[in-house]
Image (cartoon, rainbow, N blue to C red):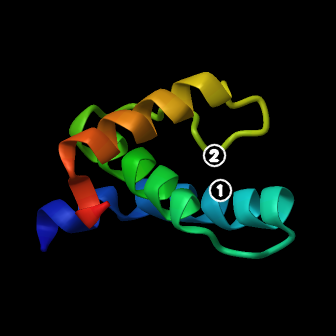
Amino acid sequence: PKAAHMYAPYLDQISKDFIDFVRRKNSGELKNADLNLWSMESVAGIVLERRLGLLKDDNDSVKAKELLTVEKSCGFYGL
């Protein structure tokens, strides 16, 4: 619990960014690929202690597509 508490503010910001991202990109419609971006951003935040920038307007879509391709080829999330 103490370790999880340490990441709460960080993950809260990522969650807020995700909500804004969905509203901007999809008119509020949630898509599976959006959840994948959120999860990768969240895991990277904890493991690497770094944001990937996948939820920003100036997101390099090539970077996001490459990460999704790796994710699918490795079978993450049952995709």
Residue 58, label in figure:
none
**Residue 77 x, y percent position in the rendering:** 27, 62
**Residue 29 x, y percent position in the rendering:** 75, 76
The reply to whether dot 2 and dot 1 touch (C-beta < 8 Å) is yes
* SS at badge 1: helix
Residue occupying the point 39% across, 31% down: 50
* SS at badge 2: loop
Give the spatial CA distance, label 2 vs label 1. Answer: 6 Å
Quarter of the view holding residue 18: bottom right
Q: Residues within 10 Å of mark 1 (few under 14, many from 20)?
A: some
Residue 17, label in figure:
1
* Type of the residue with mark 1: Asp
Chain-order first, disc 2 or disc 1: 1
Residue occupying the point 30% across, 49% down: 43
Q: Nearer the viewer, residue 30 or 42?
A: 30
Relative to 48, 34 lies left or right: right
Q: For mark 2, what is the residue?
A: 55
Q: Nearer the viewer, residue 29 or 20?
A: 29
Quadrant into which the N terminus falls: bottom left
* Type of the residue with mark 2: Leu
Residue occupying the point 32% across, 46% down: 72
Q: Eyeballing the image, is 62 above or below 48?
A: above
Relative to 8, 4 lies left or right: left
**Residue 44 x, y percent position in the rendering:** 33, 40
Q: Eyeballing the image, is 73 above or below 24?
A: above
Relative to 50, 2 lies left or right: left
